[in-house]
Amino acid sequence: MCRYFSLSVTLRYIAVMTMLFSCSGHSGSHQKDIDYTKLRYVMVETQIARRDITDKNVLEAMRTVPRHLFVPEEFRDDAYRDGPLPIGHDQTISQPYIVAIMTQLLKIDSVSKVLEIGTGSGYQAAVLAEISDSVYTIEIIPALGRHADSLLDSLGYTSVQVRVGDGYLGWPEAEPFDAIIVTAAAPKLPQPLLDQLKVGGRMVIPVGQFSQELMLITKSEEGVVKESVIPVRFVPMTGEIQKRQT
């Protein structure tokens, strides 16, 4: 899946790094901000742009959102590494590449209405909000939901609506959605979410228990088309869906 940098990508990368290092005369907390910005650009160039993520809106969103603010302070210096990180309550913030590929698969733009199931830290919602002006997100763990809501608001993501509740049930009063993204693994496709997806809409969801596949679901008048994308490993979806596994 990975490919080497093209010459144009490499030149852009060198230009960005030159610009960032030219600011190295600053000190204190501002210098730390510059360091995180540098790490964010490196993350996008090395972990995302070279792995078949080509959507310019997704790449720009990943360059913009301060991922280090969405993880506990003790993990901030690891925020731009190629892997997930714990955020408390036995939950994680996903690997940057996984956030990017799930966002790209949705094919959203500024007028898309997007539903996210599993707010977690709020990072994925922030990435979505950099592209779409209408993002709804649901978190089943109250402490995570409240913290994400406060953080997103403090960072200016006022277009994101956060709800604490069971994501299996979706957000019926806001349907239909152009895109739905689920950031916890479901043993099977949640029917309420399929019902709330607009005809022509797309849903990205990890499906399975121990063995999981990231699935792209496209809804049409005739039904749904399911496409397996890549193997993944997500925390399990909890709540009502656990009662409906049989």
Image (cartoon, helix red, strand yellow):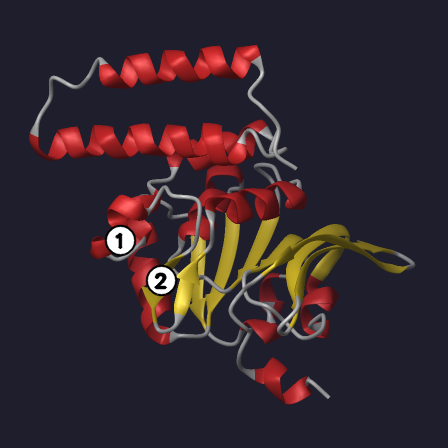
Label 2 or label 1, whichever comes before in sequence order: 1
User: Disc 1 residue type?
Assistant: Phe
Tell whether 218 sits left or right of 124. Answer: right
Q: Name the residue at 17% across, 34% down.
A: 32
Q: Which one is in front, 52 or 203?
A: 52
| Residue 56 drawn at (x, y percent) | 56, 27
Quick check: 75 above or below 138?
A: above
Residue extending farthest to the left is 28
- Quadrant holding the N terminus: top right
What residue would you read off at disc 2? 86
| Residue 10 drawn at (x, y percent) | 49, 15
Badge 2: how crowded within 10 Å, few (<14), some, or many (20+)?
some
Does residue 172 show up?
yes
Q: Which one is in front, 22 or 216?
A: 22
| Residue 11 drawn at (x, y percent) | 47, 10
Quick check: 166 above or below 68?
A: below
Tell whether 242 sits left or right of 126. Answer: right
Secondary element at tag 1: helix
Residue 215 placement: quadrant = bottom right
Tell whether 143 sits left or right of 10. Answer: left
User: Disc 2 residue type?
Assistant: Pro
What residue would you read off at disc 1? 75
Badge 1: how crowded within 10 Å, few (<14), some, or many (20+)?
some
Q: Which one is in front, 161 or 210?
A: 210
- Quadrant holding the C terminus: bottom right
Tell whether 138 sits left or right of 192. Answer: left
Q: Name the residue at 63% across, 89% down.
A: 243
